[in-house]
Image (cartoon, coloured by chain):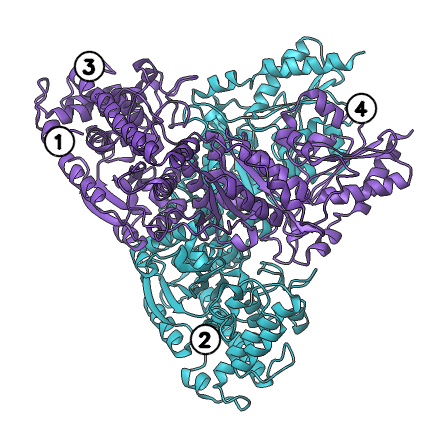
Chain colours: A cyan, B purple
Amino acid sequence: MLSESESSGRESAVTGLTFEQLCINTIRFLSVDMVQKANSGHPGAPMGAATMACVLWDRFLKHNPDNPSWPDRDRFILSAGHASAMLYSLLYLTGYDLSLDEIRRFRQWGSRTPGHPEYGTVPGVETTTGPLGQGFANGVGMAMAERWLAARYNKPGHEIIDHYTYAVVSDGDLEEGVASEAASLAGTLRLGKLIYLYDDNGISIEGDTDITFTEDVAQRFQAYGWQVVGPIDGLEPADISRAIKMAQEETERPSLIICRTIIGYGSPNKQGKASAHGEPLGEEEVRLAKERLGWPYAEPFTVPLEVLAHFRLAVERGNRWQQEWEDKLQEYRRAYPDEARQLESELQGELPAGWDGELAEVLKDIDKPVATREVSGRVMNKIARTVHSFIGGSADLAPSTKTLLKEYGDYGSEDYAGRNLRFGVREHAMGSVANGMALHGGVIPYTGTFLVFYDYMRPSLRLAALMGVRVIFIFSHDSVGLGEDGPTHQPVEQLMALRGVPGLVTIRPADATETVEAWRVAIERNNGPTALVLSRQNLPLLDRAVLAPAGGLQQGGYILREARKTPEVIIIGTGSEVHIALAAARELEQEGQGARVVSLPSWELFEAQPEEYRNRVLPPGIRARVSIEAGIPLGWERYVGLDGTAIGLPRFGASAPGEVVYQQLGLTPQRVVEEARRLLERRQP
Amino acid sequence: MLSESESSGRESAVTGLTFEQLCINTIRFLSVDMVQKANSGHPGAPMGAATMACVLWDRFLKHNPDNPSWPDRDRFILSAGHASAMLYSLLYLTGYDLSLDEIRRFRQWGSRTPGHPEYGTVPGVETTTGPLGQGFANGVGMAMAERWLAARYNKPGHEIIDHYTYAVVSDGDLEEGVASEAASLAGTLRLGKLIYLYDDNGISIEGDTDITFTEDVAQRFQAYGWQVVGPIDGLEPADISRAIKMAQEETERPSLIICRTIIGYGSPNKQGKASAHGEPLGEEEVRLAKERLGWPYAEPFTVPLEVLAHFRLAVERGNRWQQEWEDKLQEYRRAYPDEARQLESELQGELPAGWDGELAEVLKDIDKPVATREVSGRVMNKIARTVHSFIGGSADLAPSTKTLLKEYGDYGSEDYAGRNLRFGVREHAMGSVANGMALHGGVIPYTGTFLVFYDYMRPSLRLAALMGVRVIFIFSHDSVGLGEDGPTHQPVEQLMALRGVPGLVTIRPADATETVEAWRVAIERNNGPTALVLSRQNLPLLDRAVLAPAGGLQQGGYILREARKTPEVIIIGTGSEVHIALAAARELEQEGQGARVVSLPSWELFEAQPEEYRNRVLPPGIRARVSIEAGIPLGWERYVGLDGTAIGLPRFGASAPGEVVYQQLGLTPQRVVEEARRLLERRQP
């Protein structure tokens, strides 16, 4: 790290500004030029926040551009993702694998510099941001993962996990509820290594924040249990530097540094105004801004050589840091070989060999109907014993979602090695925090709530899917079968909504045996999130001696019960309704009809199968198809087509005991049989 | 209202407790008995909060059980909806149209006492609660509507609109992000007539709130700009009474009264524990609790006659209050006949005759392609002139969503008569606040954000649909066509997700003419919410001289362009993709194929049409069908079946100019033509 005198005392030969100001202006105008060239984007935030970013990256951030995935690097999150040009500028300048050509191709098809930072598109982007508040909550998750790994693996004299999590957050981030939830959680958990710089520029898209955001942010964060530093002058490097040091010195509380800045700083006609936010400044205004800030280069994308050379010192510094860490790791390996092996394996996201060897044991005890949420809980407790990085929790519903890991304690400031997270009634933060934990690495996080409350955390699941991170989202109480709590708690449209999210795998097992298989898929799936959809009500065990094996779940859908003669009708179900489908098929077969039952627990897995397999399960020639699922029918036409019938709930549920609701709303074998008969009759001339 | 001495000084003849304690115990044990009889529900909250509820309802709440829709009544919200038994007890006791039989049928099929309070099921339930945080935010909306109507209609000496909005809120409510957003907004807006009683019982489902909720709630709400009263003893009527008076005296700030209570108060083995929360106490524990609190009646559902007589005074009081108000209204009618007429009409939710007479004028100026969001904005400004109760705003995106009513000012503490609401970056609160405004009555609220951020407010839309309230949700930037902002901002699964919500009508107009029609539907629809889905990019005007009239939108779907010869293939599109469908049809027709184009802007409206009409638009015999929509294909199989093709995006979008994204992702006429050809070829032997 540069000392303050080194970095800010030098005078720039070119402009008379300090050298650090030249560095800051380089970030500023690279960003402005990117937006201008793309004729699209957000110049105002980079112009105002460049000072904060420069000081943090140049004086504090422990990272290695040569190895962006070095596990003990500090994490940096640009929660205000619309300032992406600033992040790309920093990545380019400090020597990440991002060329100036890519900088010039900002926001163009196939470029590595999309409109908002996207995890996986360019190294150094720690998380996908843009939807406000998400980055804020992701950072809390990263800091939680860091504390967990540290508590678990650090030994006296061996601080093998020890890094900060930084973020730049905006007004908009702090207005979002998900940030409030995450902030309250971070305060409770006393995450002292979480340091957020708040770009307090007083402007949002509709104008001055006074029109809608008059709260006392400092007091609010103090109430959450944070240290609040400032307000400071966010355009003054020395002040920022001092504030970050204060934040580092506070080890008990997360820190919010309030940096007063000016949006569009330097733009004579737009600075301090909403007009600087979301559109290019315009050629002329760019010229004026460069003039105003003493930037002598007319050519866009100019990077003074000495500035580049200075920023690129990050590479040498980064390699040195990493080497020091590798040396420490070497010592750790010697002193604690087992722990080291396990840590390294977990950081790679690997699973221990034979991790799932005991899962099926949970089936042994089952001699009567049991809810899939209950089976899931037992499976999870098996998993926890072999997969040590498996940690998670529920949004204040653990006794109902059955997500508690019974042999392991609570995660909290008393014991950061605990494996049960207590999210509180904060579904949205739970999802985003879990994403942050998965992004950090070293852990396989899960979350738990009722399926209907998927609605509260929908933005998090979308981002998990977009980023392709391994988070397991557990949703119990998956239908009107939950009964008396009524329509506010009964999901009907949520299951299909999950299936609509690209990249998410949703699994709704039909019984205990499918639940075991579902967990195998979820844990093994390392390139994206999985949603497990579980019943509140008890479900009979499918008799695998008579029916097809549960391993069929791995293909997403399978012939659970073949017709005794040539199948004339196919009945398709998922989860609890598979049992209704089976009962209906039995009745149809007694009537002499050939009825096949298909269990379709995961549409995504099924659709990933070869066409030949899919056509075997659902032969295109058999058009008499009835599906049954306790959710909206919309979407089921994919499998029943124009000639079949989708039995479901095109309406909200009702408050009554679950079996009564099923009966009253027509989720019954009788209804399936009637529809099947109708289809079979229609078929005949 | 009773004075304190009247209500608490009398001694109960039966038990030696004060009469008020007997009243409180009646609420408490009615609730406990309901839960016990249903063998399902939440006894703990009613037992702890009965004192607060009794004091508020008996000493303060201005309401009329004989006329639950009297416009100037105080609003009462049980945000902690799981305490529904307490609310039903209050409604029964104070004389609402709810029988003791219904109380006994708590949580049973067809009863008026569902598991959580449902708006419309029983009079006196002001909003549907249960999903935590929603009631909190609804109340903010109600208080906003009250202030707006007061600012608009009250005259010196004529306080025709003047009531409080009360709520009982729980720990869980305050943990939810939506409550944080709404609280910050309420503070900014200085809603002095909003009074919330916080049932601070220190317990949530997973245990003591210390495990996850250690923030300083008082300080947090002070930071939002609220008056915080307490903590007080929430089991002490006199303290509660004093606190409510303090809250009423504070006219500038909303008030949060922190009431320390004990969950399950009275239950010797469960009070103060999570086990009191969500399951019946059990017969024996009920007996012990009754014994502990000196409740002498063994028979469940006992209501001492003098208690009932006392509570039923609410009817007489209520009628007197209403009569006083009717008298005031009579005077107001005399002094301000026009305003009175308008107010009464707006409170009825009526629209002025000829309100939509000028809407089509916006079409006159259009001589080049224009975005539907832009057209929508112009239509809204026409509507605002005739429909004076039409108010709303955006979650900090008004310049982009085009939702500003230009001739009307901002709503805020400087001018509560303004019609532009500034929600800030708080989508979730925006939705729930709009619901509250609609529930209050007298206004027709709208909201605005990007379609992708529907995810942030999904719980609000669900509740709007479940309650059947008139809220218009505007979603612009409706596809990957928004371009450079990339996949974080590009909706793909949101449109189909909207269609999945029962009771919601979603409309995605194809051009300016359909946009005008869409607004007609939205404003006229008074029994449920409407989502308008609008383009960012410019779209050509459909040439209605050649094509079918835009009025077809009223049927949800219509034949936009008939094939020149017998139709062989049907191309179906919505919104911006209708133009692609048309271009493809033209090409196919040039090749000699009969191609019909169907515009399907609203699936819900289409499905509400008679089968005959639907079969005319989409004849069952024509199976060569291609749909195109810039969203997930899942769901489109409803119209294209197993034999057609749904062109869409089974993936996330990408950052690039919109037209490039369309091209790269295959949203093109060429692709439609190719698919149509393939289907037509396959058809031939």
Closer to the N terminus: mark 1 or mark 3? 1
Which percent across, then down, holds residue B598?
A: 74, 34
Residue A52 appears in the figure = yes
Circle 4/circle 1 CB separation < 8 Å: no
The quadrant the N terminus of chain A occupies is: bottom left
Q: Chain of mark 2?
A: A
Within 10 Å of the Cα at label 3, are there few (<14), some (14-19), or many (20+) other Cα atoms?
Answer: few
Q: Amino acid at mark 2?
A: Val
Which percent across, then down, holds residue A390?
A: 47, 47
Residue bearing the label numbered 2: A55
Tag in front: 3 or 4: 4
Same-chain check, marks 3 and 2: no
Q: Amino acid at mark 4?
A: Gly
Inter-mark Cα distance, 2 to 4: 69 Å
Closer to the N terminus: mark 3 or mark 4? 3
Residue bearing the label numbered 3: B298
Using the image, tell me which numbered label, if any, was put on residue B621.
4
Residue A600 appears in the figure = no
Tag in front: 2 or 4: 4
Q: Amino acid at mark 1?
A: Ser
Inter-mark Cα distance, 1 to 2: 64 Å
Q: Which residue is rendered at x = 28% and y = 46% of the image?
A: B192
Tag in front: 1 or 2: 1
The quadrant the C terminus of chain A occupies is: top right
Q: Left or right: where does residue A241 sit relative to residue A291?
A: left
Residue placed farthest to the bottom in the image? A13
Inter-mark Cα distance, 3 to 4: 69 Å
Closer to the N terminus: mark 4 or mark 1? 1
Identify whether A303 is placed above or below A476: below
Q: Nearer the viewer, residue B544 or B669?
A: B544
Circle 3/circle 2 CB separation < 8 Å: no
